[in-house]
Image: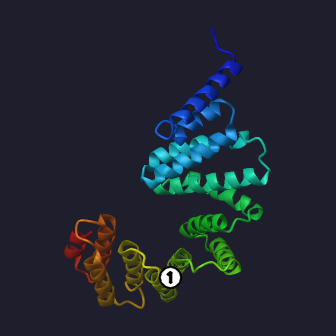
Amino acid sequence: RSIDPVTIREMHLDIIGVLRDLGVDYANPARLGYHQERAGQFEEACRSYLTAARELMAQNLNYRAVEVIENALNLMGSLPTPGSRRSILLQARIYNHAYDAYENIGTVPQRAQLIDKLVALVPSLNETRLLQRIHRNIITYYVFQYEFDKAEIYLNALDELTQLHKSEEDPLYFDLKGYLHFFKNEMITARDCWKKALLIRRSASVSGDYLSNNIALIAKTLMYEPRNLDAAAGMLNFSLKKLEIGKSAPQRAYLLSQLGNVEFYRNNLETSRRLM
């Protein structure tokens, strides 16, 4: 015979209590979210799923993070007070982290839908750090979709946010601005933006991995007009020597691929193929 909904809800509430009593080894956020959802605690479930997705993304378990954050996305229509400030903040955080998760696995259609939702929520938000993170994702999406006019609107808004709240200079802002000018074939301006990002990171003693990515972007601009392939190769080789042997494999691969591009433009096709 079937169990009535009230009994099912009470059962899940009991399980939530037991998990919390047992401590963090048992009350992991994804498990809590599952039982909170089935107990009708939709806002609490969304918060638990969001926490779980963050933890999974920090471990590079991105496909699992997508599965978990989708549970929260499916509950957006069930939030008890969707128009409240508390609920709007929760929705914005979930949409923004969902965007990050989908970006990590390279899924485009879902990102387009999430950007529309984030754009709609921006006017209702006043938390500076959250707004900065959301603006970065909106700019990233528009830049790589070649929607440059929209990207510039949010770049200007991000710059205003930084100045208004006297935040520290943001290297990610200059990264994104550099990409915008790079895709518009404005290489000198792109290079200046990426140099600025590099200087900010160096002054903040950021790790060599991040610096190598910046240097590779600067070198990339030297492969186009005005072209200076020797300077590009010199920068890339310098960065390679700075990386620790046996570590930083993704950064090493990226630098080598860019060296391959240099050799391609030099018409050394065999060397280019080997480096790539």
Residue shown at 62% from the left, 43% from the top: 72
Q: Residue furthest front?
A: 21
- The x, y position of residue 38, in whole percent, is 63, 30
Image quarter of residue 216: bottom left
Report if residue 73 is visible in the image: no
Q: Residue at x 54, y 81 (%)?
A: 181
How far across and how far down the image is residue 113, in percent?
A: 63, 53
Question: Colour scheme used in the picture?
Answer: rainbow
- Look at mark 1 in the image and give the residue it sits on: 185
Name the residue nearer the viewer: 9 or 260. Answer: 9
Q: Is residue 28 above or below residue 11?
A: below
Frontmost residue, 163 versus 26 = 26
Q: Position of residue 65 (x, y in %)?
A: 49, 47
Query: Quadrant of residue 219 in the image?
Result: bottom left
Figure check: 10 above or below 83: above
Relative to 137, 228 lies left or right: left
| Location of the N terminus (image quadrant) | top right
| Residue 2: image location, x then y, percent | 64, 12
Quadrant, the C terminus: bottom left
Near-viewer residue (136 or 131): 131
* Mark 1 crowdedness (10 Å alpha carbons): few <14, some 14-19, many ≥20: some
Residue at 42% in and 79% down: 205
